[in-house]
């Protein structure tokens, strides 16, 4: 059974950038939180013991400001495009407020779940079709009691993409996919961050999906 690409769902996006060190006085962090909290669904402000603060919301959104690092993450129940727009929009507002002109991607993390609809189909997809491990070799590890996953590393210029594909043990009809891209060239604005995130998603929905389905049984 070939898995349906329409059932591949992105559930989480995380973005972390490095930048020049900036001052983060608590009174200004509080004012910034007040200016963005309603628009981005953030309800809690927590100051760090060292300079910086975390803004968070009830649906898993989190925004972390430190003197030389900014992170934005959250679930993407509204869909990747709209979710990315909100997460990156908040980063963009922070860059403008604190006069940050150049940033570097520390990591872009995308988590997806692919429902292949039948429990045995999920296991077969990874073990038999993607990895090509026959029953005799699988028996050496424990046979039907063993589930296998896949790790992929890909280098693109200054960036490295690491991908983990494995079964969701609590829901055996689903496959868990986690992609983390780290490094890359300097970016002049949040638009470059959006391009980096889109690139990871394009790899997920393009080459990785094609790789996963190339040998799948029809």
Image: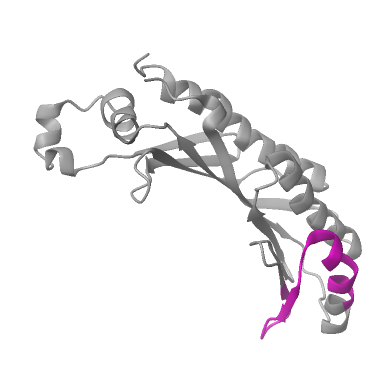
Q: Residue at x 65, y 48 (%)?
A: 77
Q: Position of residue 193 (x, y in %)?
A: 74, 45
From the image, which quarter does the N terminus lie in? top left
Which residue appears farthest toward the bottom when viewing the image? 49
Q: Is residue 110 left or right of residue 124?
A: right
**Residue drawn 13% across the image and 42% down it:** 141
Q: Is residue 131 above or below residue 53?
A: above
Q: How is the image coloured?
A: one colour
Q: Which residues are magenta?
A: 31-54
Up/down of 102 relative to 4, above or below = below
Horizontal placement of 99 versus 1: left or right?
right
Residue 120 at x, y percent in the picture: 29, 33
Q: In the figure, 50 relative to 133: above or below?
A: below
Q: Is residue 32 magenta?
A: yes
Q: Give the quadrant of the C terminus.
A: top left
Name the image quarter holding residue 158.
Answer: top right
Q: Residue at x 20, y 43 (%)?
A: 146
Q: Is residue 217 left or right of residue 99?
A: left
In the depicted view, which residue is nearer to us: 13 or 175?
A: 175
- Residue 8: % across, % down: 53, 33
Q: Nearer the viewer, residue 40 or 1?
A: 1
What is the tally of numbered marks visible in this picture? 0
Q: Is residue 35 magenta?
A: yes
Residue positioned most to the front: 118
In the rendered image, residue 10, in percent from the top left (x then y), is placed at 58, 41
């Amino acid at each position: 059974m070939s898995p349906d690409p329409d059932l591949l769902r992105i559930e989480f996006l995380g973005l972390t950038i490095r930048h020049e060190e900036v001052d983060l006085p608590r009174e200004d962090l509080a004012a910034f939180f007040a200016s963005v909290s309603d628009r981005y669904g953030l309800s809690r402000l927590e100051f760090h013991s060292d300079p910086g603060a975390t803004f968070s919301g009830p649906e898993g959104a989190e925004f972390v400001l430190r003197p030389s690092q900014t992170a934005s993450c959250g679930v993407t129940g509204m869909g990747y495009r709209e979710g990315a727009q909100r997460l990156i929009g908040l980063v963009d507002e922070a860059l403008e407020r604190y006069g940050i002109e150049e940033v570097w991607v520390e990591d872009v993390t995308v988590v997806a779940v692919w429902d292949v609809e039948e429990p045995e189909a999920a296991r077969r997809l990874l073990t038999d079709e993607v990895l090509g491990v026959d029953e005799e070799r699988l028996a050496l590890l424990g046979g039907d009691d063993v589930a296998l996953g896949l790790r992929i590393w890909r280098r693109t210029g200054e960036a490295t993409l690491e991908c983990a594909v494995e079964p969701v043990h609590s829901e055996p009809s689903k496959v868990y996919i986690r992609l983390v891209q780290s490094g890359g060239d300097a970016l002049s604005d949040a638009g470059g961050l959006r391009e980096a995130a889109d690139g990871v998603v394009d790899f997920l929905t393009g080459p990785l999906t094609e790789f996963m389905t190339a040998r799948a049984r029809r």
